[in-house]
Amino acid sequence: MTAQVIQRSSLAEVERFLLALGGGNHSDNMSVLWRFRCFYLLRLSREDFFDLVFLQSKAVGEIAPQSEDRRLKAVADRALTLGDKIVGPNWDLSAIRGKFRALTMATSNYGLPALVLRDAQDAERAHGGSWYIQDGNHRALAYAMAILDGTIQYSPQLAYLATQNLHGEPAPDVIHR
């Protein structure tokens, strides 16, 4: 699998992006991201996108159960099977899909706001995913569900990657995982 590197980035750039995006978990994200030494802006292939590792918490236990595949495709498949269900606080599958549909009605080649990824660690790597979704689980899930149910076709998505791995000097065109 490969992801195209658009440019090198920095923690400051990722923080500016997250602040502009809004959301209530900025301090949580920054407390994790500062530990990484390399940052890139990537263009994700469909395969890269579906292999991203999804959040695992009690709130999303029905769609991302412990000890089961947490890659985005598996999580989205489970969510589609559940239908319009509330799986936990802030995880109303119907509302997540509805908000996404409203955003994508105007364009067939919709681009998500960039996801923020980091190297997957320990149990996050159990099913092969290399990158964990640090920020953007809701929008990634909605987009994945829309692709899998045939509502839209995948178009390459942007993501910031925080990693310990320096991928060459200068940044290569492609990161091989």
Image: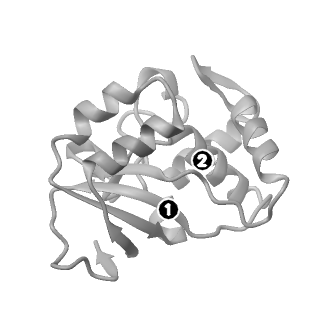
Upstream in sequence: badge 1 or badge 2: 2
User: In percent of the image, x 62 and y 53: which residue is there?
Assistant: 144
User: Neighbour class for label 1 at 10 Å: few (<14), some, many (≥20)?
Assistant: many
- Does the image show residue 153? yes
User: In percent of the image, x 20 and y 45: which residue is there?
Assistant: 122
- Does the image show residue 68? no
**Label 1 element class:** strand
User: Neighbour class for label 2 at 10 Å: few (<14), some, many (≥20)?
Assistant: many
Q: Position of residue 170 (x, y in %)?
A: 20, 79
Q: Which mark is residue 158?
A: 1
Which residue carries the number 2 mark? 76
Q: Is residue 20 above or below residue 130?
A: above
Front-most of residues 109 and 45: 109
Name the image colouring.
one colour
Q: Position of residue 106 (x, y in %)?
A: 84, 55
Q: Position of residue 50 (x, y in %)?
A: 51, 60
Label 1 with label 2: CB-CB less than 8 Å = no
Which amino acid type is marked by label 2?
Ala
Mark 1 or 2: in front is: 1
User: In percent of the image, x 60 and y 47: which residue is there?
Assistant: 76
